[in-house]
Amino acid sequence: MTIPPDFSSDSSLDTNDQELSPSLLSNSKYRKLSSLDSLSFQESKKPLYLQEVKSSNPWLFFIMLGLMIVGLIFNLPLIGLSSALVALFLSLRSMLPCFYNWFIRYLDSAERDLLVSLIVFILSLAGIFYYIGIYQIIGNWLDQFKYDEFGSWAEWVGALGQIMIAILAVYVAWAQYVISKDLTLQQNRITQQQTIDTYFQGISDLVLDGEGMLEDWPQERSIAEGRTAAILSSVDKIGKTKILKFLSQSRLLTPLMRDSRLGRPILDGSGGYAEDRANGIRVINLGVMLAEVDLSDQDLRWTDLSEANMVRVNLSRCDLVKANLSRTILYDANLQEVDLKNARLFYGLSDIASPRSRIHPPDYKTGAYTGIVIENCNLSRVKNLTKEQHYYLCAWGGEHTRGTIPGGCHNIPNKLNKYK
């Protein structure tokens, strides 16, 4: 009894097709290779006069060169010239594709356009010189030139050769200087990264106990701040950015809620440490470590820079998306083209918030004395300002800052003069 095949399950058929597809592909490739082999075998079986001759065949070049030499020896110009032209044509046919492939591979579109433009410029300039008579003027001058008064041509060529050798020596010295400078910069970057990695490991060992819990006693916090101040003064702006992001993401710059007896940080019940802006203690207090530093063109997103003294800092073209700048002193700072999208400049409402004060403590419920100090700053072309941020910057920026804020500060009072 025969059982008919079951065609009801399409998925099983698709699966079988997918499983068989690699074998089918390999079989098709094998058939193609075997067909090529058979064609080459059949080609080799043909007589010599019926086989296809490739233009890049070296024997063809040798034959043409031999005919050209025969024409030169026996004074047969027709054979010599024709063989030379054929050899030239065959060599160009072999070389031009190679040159084209090199041209496409090693030169991008901009470099190709520049090279073509340069060639056209030189040829067009040569044509212009021909039509306006420059070559004729040079020829007449050379005809009237008295070469005996300036010595032999050999002396001129020798002097020109010495000049070219001197120019070449200067170029080689300059190239060596550039290479040495690049190697030095690369070595400095490697050394700096090793120093930063050592700092990360040292800070982690200092403030964490054996179980990975944060345990920072007062002296340990002082040592951590000293290490941070020392390394921030010895690295470039890229290294400073890495250190700030590490400290911020590790919550070592965030004021943490502490035990009233031992001063240990308190867990928040969700896997982290509880934050206490009003009375918390930071593991590392930046203080004046970032005053007058250059942090331009850096990525400082989600970085906690609150209460840092950043007087005359250069933050131009920085990305400060969701950065915490509450109570940060940015007096006389450069903030051109900074991205302040969702950056925290204060707590509470914008019409109640005010900059930090030396006398009054901050009120994080109403926002009084929790804001950034933004006096005498350059805020030209600042991006992604919200209405609350715009109002606060105009109200507490002062005359100089108000004049640089995009969109102006019309109908927004200058509260800084009244505050003073």
Image: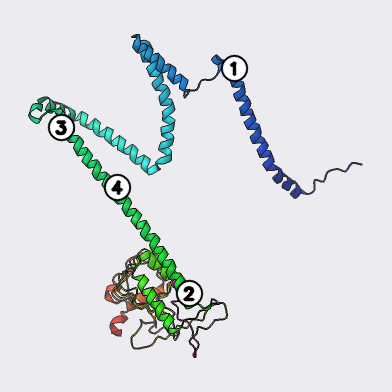
Above or below: residue 173 compared with residue 328: above
Q: Which one is closest to the eye, mark 3 or mark 2?
A: 2
Residue on which the image places disc 2: 205
What amino acid is found at the position of numbered circle 1 in the picture?
Lys
Nearest to N terminus: mark 1 or mark 2: 1
Q: How far apart are marks 4 and 2 (CA)?
A: 45 Å
Q: Which one is closest to the eye, mark 1 or mark 2?
A: 2
Q: Which quadrant would the N terminus be assigned to in this image?
A: top right
Residue on which the image places disc 3: 156
| Marker disc for residue 270 | none
Image position, residue 136 (x, y; %): 16, 27
Q: Distance between the residues labelled 3 and 2?
A: 73 Å
Q: Which one is closest to the eye, mark 1 or mark 3?
A: 3
Residue on which the image places disc 1: 46
Residue on which the image places disc 4: 175
Image position, residue 259 (x, y; %): 50, 87
